[in-house]
């Protein structure tokens, strides 16, 4: 089995790319705007699968905000001061450009002196989705398609993809787990009979799935290692269920949280007319991942900082904060995620 931080042999990765993991601690709402359907404020999804995603622009914007303390003050023609990544000043006939660390990593915010940042983000893809279970409270579900993507992106080894893909009424999960040196029944399986034969089943939401095989060897352990510091995620090996691609898409589209919102009229203390709406949220304990690529410094006349320097600087900030907020409704506790960049922690030289 691969080491936790090694790149699987089948992955197409450059030496200057890393995997960023995002594990939702609270429900997450990255909105797709208004809708004509039953949900007034839906989340962003892939068009062809219906899987929730976090756009790269949301990731980049949130992380760039963590560098706000490096921004420079600039006074405009009206005497107003604002903070900028790139500051241009005139010294006689010459324009002097001053850039910040935020400009180096995330790009310029000056249209007259534009350049790209050293870090490139992909959208965050879904890898494991929490769902209600009739036994054991909840499970994490995934599917062969998501596992194949994770292999392609270098998250998991090729052995993570099951050779016996389940049908729509089937599921792959662990019937037993090893605990205290002995085998015990897994937390999700229910005993049932089918045509007089004893079978194991798992009930997710209101749907029943028959055990069609065990998880691929080492998959649960490999997933645990992605966020081994998180006490909740550490249970993934015993709570993981692999469903068919079709059932995964169904649950991803129909098992997200829908929260009702209403505005209260301050004078009457009751709901304001026409102010009721519902909002879709990705549930807490959902795992996403994003691929980050690094490039040499692109700032004009910069320090020629390397790709490793860019990744190490970004990693230091991620490790320091640990938790970032993405999407809307931060003031009501939505969107807080544990964030981890793969690889070892490093001290960054100033």
Image: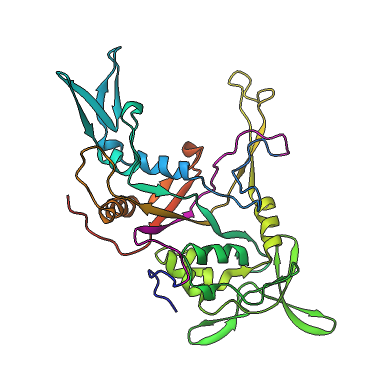
**Residue 26 locus on image (x, y percent):** 51, 49
For the residue pair 116 and 23, the one nearer the viewer reads as 116
Q: Is residue 149 above or below residue 87?
A: below
Q: Residue furthest bottom?
A: 182
Q: Is residue 16 magenta?
A: yes
Instruction: Determine the residue located farthest toward the left in the rendered image.
Output: 92
Asked whether, in this view, residue 237 is left or right of residue 316, the answer is right
* 164 lies left or right of 5: right
Q: In which quarter of the view is residue 208 placed?
A: bottom right
Residue 60 part of the magenta segment: no
Q: Percent x, y for residue 88?
A: 24, 26
Question: Which quadrant of the structure image shows residue 62?
Answer: top left
Q: Is residue 268 above or below residue 321?
A: above
Q: Decide if residue 101 is on the left or right side of residue 142.
A: left
**Furthest residue toward right:** 195
Q: Specify whether residue 40 is in view.
A: yes
Q: Which of the 4 image quadrants contains residue 39?
A: top right
Residue at 54% in and 73% down:
160
In this view, which residue lies farthest toward the top?
A: 78
Q: How many marks?
A: 0
Q: At x 66% / y 79%, what residue is drawn?
A: 213
Region of the chain picked out in magenta, as a range? 10-38
Residue 141 in the image, given as x and y percentages of width and height: 61, 64
Whether residue 301 is situated above or below residue 5 in the rendered picture = above
The secondary structure that dominates the magenta segment is loop
Residue at image location 27% in from the left, 13% down from the top: 79
The reply to whether residue 137 is in sight is no
The residue closer to the viewer here, 86 or 22, is: 86
């Amino acid at each position: 089995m691969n080491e936790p931080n090694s790149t699987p042999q089948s992955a197409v990765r450059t030496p200057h790319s890393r995997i960023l993991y995002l594990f939702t601690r609270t429900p997450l709402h990255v909105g797709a705007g208004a809708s004509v359907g039953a949900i007034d404020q839906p989340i962003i999804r892939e068009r062809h699968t219906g899987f929730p995603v976090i756009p790269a622009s949301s990731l980049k914007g949130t992380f760039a905000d963590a560098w706000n303390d490096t921004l420079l003050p600039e006074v405009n023609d009206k005497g107003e001061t604002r903070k900028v990544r790139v500051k241009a000043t005139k010294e006689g006939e010459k324009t002097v450009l001053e850039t910040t660390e935020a400009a180096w990593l995330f790009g310029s915010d000056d249209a007259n002196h534009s350049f790209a940042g050293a870090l490139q983000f992909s959208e965050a893809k879904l890898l494991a989705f929490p769902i209600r279970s009739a036994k054991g409270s909840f499970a994490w579900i995934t599917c062969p398609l998501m596992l194949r993507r994770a292999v392609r992106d270098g998250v998991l080894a090729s052995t993570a993809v099951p050779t016996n893909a389940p049908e729509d009424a089937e599921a792959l999960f662990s019937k037993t787990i090893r605990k205290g040196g002995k085998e015990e029944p897994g937390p999700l399986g229910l005993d049932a009979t089918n045509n007089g034969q004893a079978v194991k089943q798992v009930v997710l939401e209101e749907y029943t799935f028959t055990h069609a095989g065990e998880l691929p060897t080492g998959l649960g352990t490999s997933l645990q290692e992605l966020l081994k510091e998180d006490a909740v995620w550490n249970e993934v090996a015993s709570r993981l269920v692999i469903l068919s691609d079709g059932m995964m898409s169904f649950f991803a589209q129909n098992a997200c949280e829908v929260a009702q919102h209403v505005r209260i009229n301050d004078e009457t203390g009751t709901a304001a007319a026409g102010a009721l709406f519902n909002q879709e949220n990705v549930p807490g304990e959902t795992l996403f991942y994003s691929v980050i690529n690094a490039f040499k410094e692109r700032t004009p006349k910069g320090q020629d900082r390397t790709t490793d320097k860019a990744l190490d600087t970004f990693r230091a900030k991620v490790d320091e904060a640990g938790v970032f907020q993405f999407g809307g409704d931060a003031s009501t506790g939505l969107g807080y995620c544990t964030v981890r960049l793969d690889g070892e922690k490093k001290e960054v030289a100033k």
